[in-house]
Image: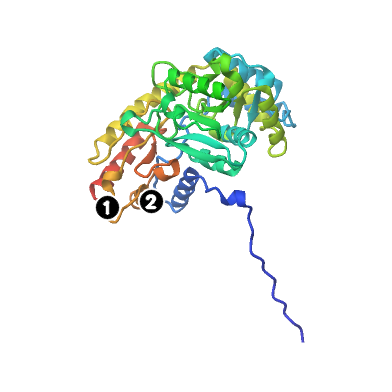
Amino acid sequence: MSTVVSPVTHPVRLTERINRIEPSATMAVVAEADKLRQQGIDVVDFGAGEPHFSTPQHIKDAAIAAIQANFSKYTPVGGTAELKDAIVHRHAVDFDSDYRREETAASVGGKHALFNVISVLVDHGDEVILPVPYWVSFKDMVRYAGGNCVLLQSDESQGFRVTADMVAHLVTPKTRLIILNSPSNPSGAVMSAEDMTEVVRLAHQRGIWVISDECYVYLNYTSKRFSVGSLREYRDRFLVVGSLSKTYAMTGWRLGFTLGPAPIITAVQKLQSQSTSNPTSIVQKAAVAALKGPQQCVEDMRAEYIKLRDHVVKGLRSIPGVKCTLPEGAFYAYPNVSAFFGRSGINSASEIAGKLLREVHVATVPGEGFGTKEHIRVSYATSMAELDRGLERMGKFFGGL
């Protein structure tokens, strides 16, 4: 008679550091919207933060040529010399910076670049000043590294703008890092060049690091785009993180970069050498074409985003009870929907976003993921016709509450 032995099960034990963080709120919305589409449901997607434009043809051609030329081997961890030179060249031309090849590293997207930099700068117990609303991954990256976020509350009535005085009031002896994101995801707020300069000057004086996330730097709708990279006299205390994703409609290609002091870049590349190694070789060739090729595509997309921005803000403001500041950059509107709390059992932005998706099939991202409880994020990186479809559905939804 045989004996059946039951398998021994053990509880899954995860590390403390992975339990500090949450899944990306934006990625969760993308996944939920995809599930509905797979069921044949027509979803208007205001959730994903990516351009609706196609990657420009000359960039695609460069990738195809790289494939045909069998450019498919490993490259140096931080990118080829050709790519590093192209990154440095583009930034110098557009922002009057003066970086060298050893002061830049390419990565697998801007998010990867930010994760690398935060990982090499932030240690356990370090304080990191983070303006609210913040991009969803900042707080979790800091927490994963062991740091503590000191949240800077911005004023919605002032367009969520962050000033140097607001930052200065939060600096303590434990402050290790200040994170700036201008134009901002999710609010579209733009810091003035004067305030950004003053923050960098303060950090330089106090021995604090600054990360300037300039993913949307080319989508600045104010008078003139600005990068802290132009502040050469303070360059030993800040890092510029950039991405080709939004500038050239290359989100899925995954190519970001860091500009900063050579010792930090060396550390970033050491970390990257033990994780992803180099960015995809073929994408590096496409990135060179993007950075050194014609730039009219960047201006054309920017002009279209301004039209879409004006249209979506007008549409949101026309819905009774919805308040919306005018974003000065990026491609997001960040409407305040708190007037509907208490109606139909709704008590949070998450519940509103959930009902919008399930009941009228409009995907948005709830503000809780960005550090506020009263807002939803609406991406207007889509066609005018799609905006109108979504705004109509939103109007009927809020009108029925």
Q: Nearer the viewer, residue 314 or 212?
A: 212
Residue 163 visible in the picture? no
Residue at left offset 47%, top offset 29%: 53
Which label is found at residue 281?
Answer: none
- Residue 198 place in picture, x, y as percent: 47, 20
Q: Earlier in the sequence, mark 2 or mark 1?
A: 1
Which residue, as the protein is rendered here, is positioned at the far bottom? 1
Q: Is 377 located above or below residue 84 in the figure?
A: below
- What SS does tag 2 mark? helix
Residue at left offset 44%, top offset 30%: 169
Residue 167: quarter of image: top left
Q: Nearer the viewer, residue 300 or 16?
A: 16
In the image, is 266 to the left or to the right of 109? right
Which label is found at residue 342?
Answer: 1
Give the Cα separation between the discs numbered 2 and 1: 15 Å
Residue 283: quarter of image: top right
- Residue 386 place in picture, x, y as percent: 36, 37
Residue bearing mark 2: 354
- The nearer-to-camera label among 2 and 1 is 1
Identity, as a three-letter code, of the amino acid under mark 1 = Gly
Q: Nearer the viewer, residue 378 or 40?
A: 378
Dot 2 alpha-carbon crowd within 10 angstroms: few under 14, some 14 to 19, many 20 or more = many
Q: Is 226 located above or below residue 398 in the figure?
A: above
